[in-house]
Image (cartoon, rainbow, N blue to C red):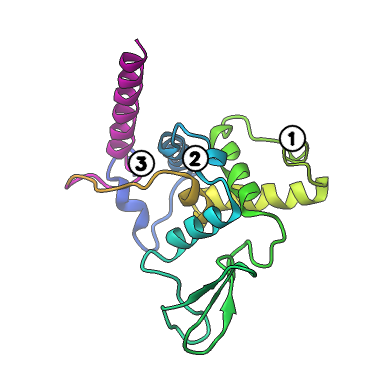
Amino acid sequence: MSCVSGIWSVHCIKGFSLSDSDERELERRHRQILRLRLPDEPVDQRFQSERDCVFRLSDVRWPDGPVCGKCGDGRPSWVESRRLFQCRRCRYQYSVTAGTNLHRTRIDLRLWFHTAEVAIRSWSSPISVRAVAIDLGVPVATAHRMRKIVLKDISRDGRGLLSEAVCLPIGHLPDGIVAGSPEHLERLKLQRARHIEDMEENFH
């Protein structure tokens, strides 16, 4: 029996090897769930400034608050002029992207968020490097690097920093439903259908 059609969580067992078809099925389901978790409001409207994006990424990366990578203290101050956190204990300054694939990026986080949203919405027909370059107004070489980083991040095996930043939280799931499972996918589809029905009723 395919582990995908059987117990979903079996792929998490150490040393268990998935077949190519099971890997493709899990990736397909992962993509569907991300699309269903995207809010109706475009990311450009939800996070209208670079500061909004910084604090959204911070909330995703450090749910309990930013942590200094040098001494581990979790009570930093915010240096607005440099858009950096500063540790109150050791005075070390660090960015929200330090130690991630976006480390030392000079590209606005708003553009990274936008690219992640577009990639998730267009996953069935992957966005091209040229389309990214035109959409963002950046050189092709920059677009190529951004596309590669974003696609890796939002994949099932990626870190998911950007995908979690632009998608709605998973929230509480009833007992017996595992995040990413077929039951979770069906639950999201039902929620989305109800949301659309509510919108249509309000419109009329």
Q: Quadrant of the N terminus?
A: top left
Q: Residue furthest bottom?
A: 90
Residue at 35% over, 41% down = 4
Residue at 56% over, 57% down = 51
Residue at 58% over, 65% down = 97
User: Do callouts 1 and 2 mark residues in contact (Cβ within 8 Å)?
Assistant: no
In the rendering, at what x and y percent does residue 46 appear? 50, 42
Task: Please name the amino acid that badge 3 sits on.
Answer: Val
Instruction: Decide whether residue 185 is among the magenta residues.
Output: yes
Question: Mark 1 and mark 3: span between their CA atoms?
Answer: 34 Å
> Residue beneath label 2, please?
24
Magenta span dominant secondary structure: helix
For discs 1 and 3, the disc positioned in front in the rendered view = 1
Task: Please name the amino acid that badge 1 sits on.
Answer: Ala
SS state under label 3: loop
Q: Is residue 44 left or right of residue 25?
A: right
Badge 2 density bin: few <14, some 14–19, many ≥20, Cα 10 Å: few
Up the image or down, 78 lies above or below 191; here it is below
Q: Is residue 97 left or right of residue 136?
A: left
Task: Please name the amino acid that badge 2 sits on.
Answer: Arg
> Residue beneath label 3, please?
4
Up the image or down, 71 lies above or below 42; here it is below
For discs 1 and 2, the disc positioned in front in the rendered view = 1
Q: Earlier in the sequence, mark 1 or mark 2?
A: 2
The foreground one among 94 and 12 is: 94
> Residue beneath label 1, please?
131
Q: Report which quarter residue 75 is drawn in.
A: bottom left
Q: Which segment did they paint magenta?
A: 175-204
The foreground one among 7 and 201 is: 201
User: Do callouts 2 and 3 mark residues in contact (Cβ within 8 Å)?
Assistant: no
